[in-house]
Image (cartoon, coloured by chain):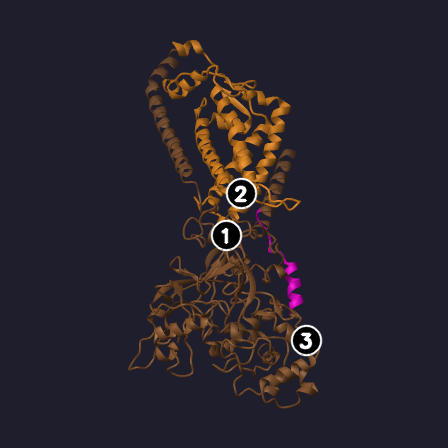
Chain colours: A brown, B orange
């Protein structure tokens, strides 16, 4: 009796222990709650610019506003003028090249190609006034545009093709009296609409983030933390944290998830360990362009078709241009699964004058490989397309695209690639042979925004699976669940089959012999 | 009919819990390997780890038991009657011939069992345990922030672990079948459950006749 009771107690206890080991309740993540508390407190400005006497006036030019800013913030313009937002360029060491000045000012892309010769239009996204050509005075503090980043009234707007000047309709007094810390729209004015429209370039940065829900972006959601861009992209002396490898190349000043979430954000040690080789974004951004489509391909070679001598456009069902005479044909995609690459934080770029050595030409190259301990897997948007190049010199061409009127060699007015190429390359200071063609190009855009809620993150089996996993393209390393040693699996399986066959044969032999021996045995027993 | 006490209480507990753990490890392990789908990858990994720690603890107890009781001597390999034992399984048993070796408390394993179980204990299980530990701690960080087991590729570790797993599964399948080759098909399993095995009183003369 006692033994039975003890046995039952032991059985019950061991079952309880097992259940507890195998099952775990969802725990409250205090670390995360603390962060939420911290970021729920929105900063309150210490100054109301509405009340400042220096701003109770009319401004005849935006430069006058800048002067008014500097009259109190006497040294800030120096910080701004040391930033890449102003210089469109950074000093960087690039493996294999050495020290280079690179940035928006001189690198090209496979969207609108490049800013040079097109400054009048492209400077809409420069934090200055009057960048009409390559003679912009980067030392003139009066041309610093404070308002584009600091306007909190949503009044400010830079004019179209006005070299960075505000639109004529802007009430400068209203803007000057309502300045403050940058809000989503200040950053978004350029970073959402780069490439000529909403979400064209990045795929993970677009106007939907102004008021979205948690499934789209867990940080910026209106029904969530409603964080602003500068909550993560903090600045010290106007040097912003964070940059993108479309224009930058060094592993410095990156805005990271770890700066808030630490490098061990999970309760599960196994997940934390993934962070050694897998970036947070890989699992936590399962899709980008969740709300509005992004451009996935741009073929400049299709540009130039005219209807009755006039440029035209074709739209898809969502109203997105699929063809523009001035730009060529496009492919758009929404809710896109990223591609994945190894990345160690450094990148190279096609710099003007480089000889094309491979097709598709990599406009930027993200460095990294699986056995480099510094490299992690990151999600990227790969933007493909073709663009103009010099067939003889084997170089990509910076064409002149924009001009105010016809006859100025601009492709968007004259639809003559030859003239556009000659004008562009002359300005860049590179030779143009006179023979152009179109070459395929690829550009890699790391995906960092549109973080999903934890429960929507990738699951283990999205990568750890035999077929069609997210990382199917990344080979050369052993991924449990996906990879296996073929000979071992084959030998093992055949051994198992052989064993079973032998067992069956042995069983049959035993049964047969048992029947055959039966008569003999009974005889023996009878004798007994 | 004689009843012989062959398997002691701990031995039986060890045998059956080891069997359960190994089968559970095989199921979860082959799920991690991508061969089967039962719990889902995440749970399979989690369960596999828990079960592996349980097995390690059990092995520690078993080693202690083997040493302190002197039971390890049961596994000293011998070639004596080895041929006869093989001959029995491949031909003798079909002719109704008796087991060539007698099973008792002092010698519970036949020469074939001794070799197989010894290799199971000193080759197969260590292979799986060592590669398993390497797998578990591959490229983890120790107290001094030094990455451990970084100079052996995960591929090599996993390959050896998989090979061991296949051999273990083959062992279990054959082992389970071999339990039916006792006096009666169920007598070996009964013995491992109760500790006692029943033997017919032997009368060699008559059977030889």
**Label 3: which secondary element:** loop
User: Which is more toward the observer, A289 or B153?
Assistant: B153
- Residue that carries the numbered disc 1 in the rendered image: A460
- Judge from the rendering whether residue A368 lies leftward or rightward of residue A17; answer left or right: left
Report the label total. 3
Magenta residues, dominant SS class:
helix
Please report whichever mark, 1 or 3, sits nearer to the chain's N-terminal start: 3
Asked if residue A20 is positioned above or below residue A151 in the image, the reply reads above
The range drawn in magenta is A22-39
- Residue that carries the numbered disc 2 in the rendered image: B48
Rendering coords of residue A146 (x, y %): 60, 78
Instruction: Report if residue A255 lies within the magenta region.
Output: no
**Label 1: which secondary element:** helix
Q: Is residue A240 something one can see in this rendering?
A: yes
Disc number placed over residue A75 in the picture, else none: 3
Asked if residue A506 is positioned above or below residue B161 in the image, the reply reads above
Asked if residue B159 is positioned above or below residue A514 in the image, the reply reads below
């Amino acid at each position: 009796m006692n033994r039975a009771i003890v046995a039952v107690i032991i059985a019950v206890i061991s079952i309880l222990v097992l259940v507890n080991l195998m099952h775990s309740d969802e725990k409250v993540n205090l670390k995360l709650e603390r962060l939420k508390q911290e970021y729920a407190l929105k900063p309150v400005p210490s100054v109301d610019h509405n009340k400042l006497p220096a701003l109770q006036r009319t401004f005849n030019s935006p430069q006058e506003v800048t002067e008014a800013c500097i009259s109190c913030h006497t040294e800030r313009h120096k910080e701004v003028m040391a930033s890449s937002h102003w210089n469109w360029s950074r000093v960087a060491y690039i493996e294999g090249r050495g020290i280079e000045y690179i940035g928006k000012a001189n690198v090209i892309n496979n969207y609108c190609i490049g800013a040079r010769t097109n400054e009048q239009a492209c400077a809409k996204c420069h934090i200055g006034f009057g960048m009409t050509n390559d003679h912009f005075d980067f030392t003139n503090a009066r041309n610093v545009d404070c308002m584009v980043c600091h306007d909190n009234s949503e009044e400010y707007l830079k004019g179209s093709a006005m070299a960075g000047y505000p639109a004529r309709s802007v009430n400068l007094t209203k803007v000057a009296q309502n300045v403050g810390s940058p809000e989503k729209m200040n950053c978004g004015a350029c970073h959402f609409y780069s490439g000529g429209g909403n979400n064209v370039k990045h795929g993970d940065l677009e106007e939907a983030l102004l008021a979205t829900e948690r499934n789209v972006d867990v940080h910026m959601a209106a029904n969530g933390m409603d964080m602003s861009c500068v909550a993560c992209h903090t600045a010290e002396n106007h040097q912003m944290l964070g940059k993108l490898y479309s224009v930058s190349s060094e592993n410095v000043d990156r805005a990271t998830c770890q700066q808030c979430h630490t490098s061990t954000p999970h309760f599960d040690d196994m997940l934390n360990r993934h962070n050694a080789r897998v970036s947070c974004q890989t699992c936590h951004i399962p899709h980008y362009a969740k709300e509005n489509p992004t451009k996935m391909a741009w073929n400049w070679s299709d540009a130039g078709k005219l209807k009755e001598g006039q440029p035209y456009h074709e739209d898809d069902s969502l109203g997105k241009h699929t063809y523009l005479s001035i730009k060529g044909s496009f492919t758009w995609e929404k809710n896109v699964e990223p591609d994945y690459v190894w990345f160690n934080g450094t990148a190279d770029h096609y710099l003007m004058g480089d000889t094309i050595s491979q097709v598709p030409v990599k406009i930027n190259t993200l460095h990294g490989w699986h056995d480099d301990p510094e490299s992690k897997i990151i999600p990227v948007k790969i933007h493909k397309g073709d663009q103009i190049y010099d067939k003889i010199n084997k170089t990509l061409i910076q064409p002149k695209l924009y001009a105010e009127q016809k006859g100025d060699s601009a492709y968007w007015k004259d639809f003559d690639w030859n003239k556009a190429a000659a004008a562009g390359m002359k300005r860049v200071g590179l030779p143009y042979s006179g023979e152009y063609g179109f070459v395929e190009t690829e550009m890699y855009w790391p995906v960092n925004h549109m973080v999903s809620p934890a429960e929507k993150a990738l699951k283990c089996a999205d990568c750890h699976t035999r077929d069609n996993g997210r990382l199917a393209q990344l080979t050369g390393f052993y991924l449990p669940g996906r990879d296996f040693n073929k000979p071992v699996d084959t030998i093992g399986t055949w051994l198992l089959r052989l064993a079973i066959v032998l067992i069956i044969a042995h069983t049959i032999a035993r049964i047969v012999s048992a029947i055959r021996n039966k008569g003999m045995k009974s005889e023996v027993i009878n004798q007994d | 009919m004689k009843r012989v006490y062959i398997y002691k209480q701990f031995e039986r507990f060890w045998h059956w819990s080891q069997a359960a753990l190994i089968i559970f490890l095989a199921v979860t392990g082959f799920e991690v390997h991508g061969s089967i789908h039962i719990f889902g990858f995440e749970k399979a990994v989690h369960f596999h780890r828990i079960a592996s720690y349980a097995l390690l603890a059990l092995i520690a107890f078993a080693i202690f038991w083997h040493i302190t009781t002197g039971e390890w001597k049961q596994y000293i390999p011998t070639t004596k009657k080895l041929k006869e034992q093989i001959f029995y399984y491949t031909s003798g048993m079909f002719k109704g011939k008796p087991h060539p070796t007698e099973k008792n408390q002092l010698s519970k394993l036949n020469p074939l069992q001794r070799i197989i179980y010894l290799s199971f204990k000193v080759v197969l299980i260590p292979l799986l345990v060592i590669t398993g530990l390497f797998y578990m701690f591959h490229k983890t960080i120790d107290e001094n922030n030094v990455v451990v087991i970084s100079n052996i590729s995960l591929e090599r570790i996993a390959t050896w672990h998989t090979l061991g797993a296949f051999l273990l599964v083959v062992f279990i399948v054959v082992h389970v079948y071999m339990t039916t080759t006792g006096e009666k098909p169920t007598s070996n399993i009964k013995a491992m459950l109760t500790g006692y095995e029943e033997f017919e009183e032997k009368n060699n003369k008559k059977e030889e006749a």
